[in-house]
Image: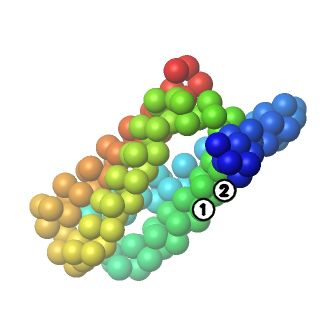
Amino acid sequence: MDNVASMALVGLPWIASHPYAYPALEVLHITGIALLVGSLLVLEFRVWGVAAELPLRPLARLSLAITLSGFALIVASGLLMFAAHPAEMLANRAFLIKMGLVQLAGLNAAWFHGRDSLALCDRTARVQTAVSSGIWLAAIICGRWIGYL
């Protein structure tokens, strides 16, 4: 293993040992999850016909901005938490499954926007939103299991 790879696996242990750093990162991570999933659910309910009086495109623009902000917070805090225990995370099945689910969520979102599902609001769009919710719920569950596997 070269020096860069071995340094990456050593990580930033001070994050894990600091009395406030890791818990603060967890709070930021959970806040990001709340922003991401909450804004997605609002848009997904609208795609399903709930609150049909709300204009879809402006709601989608607001939802996307909040979703991306939440995702940025998740990525930043998640990378720092990963840096505290990189070798353990890479050996953890729940973590690896969670990362796969996040990638799957991204592919589903790209498909949703790529086919302009907002304009269609058809059966496929509704299935995509249900799949999105399921994927994010599964990712959250895997995230909670990381400490137990």
Residue at (59%, 34%) from the top-left corner? 89
At which x and y percent is residue 68?
53, 66
Tags 1 and 2 touching, CB below 8 Å: yes
**Mark 2 lies on residue:** 76
Is disc 2 surrounded by few (<14), some (14 to 19) or many (20+) residues within 10 Å?
some
Residue 92 lies left or right of residue 128; in this view the side is: right
Residue at 46% x, 38% y is: 96
Q: What residue type is labelled 1?
A: Ala
Q: Front-most of 89 and 77?
A: 89
Q: Position of residue 39 (x, y in %)?
A: 46, 59
**Residue 72's disc number:** 1
Q: Which residue lies furthest to the front in this view?
A: 2
Q: Position of residue 115 (x, y in %)?
A: 22, 75
Query: What is the crowding at mark 1: few (fewer than 14 residues within 10 Å), some, or many (at least 20)?
Result: some
Label 1 SS:
helix
Left or right position of 141 against 107: right
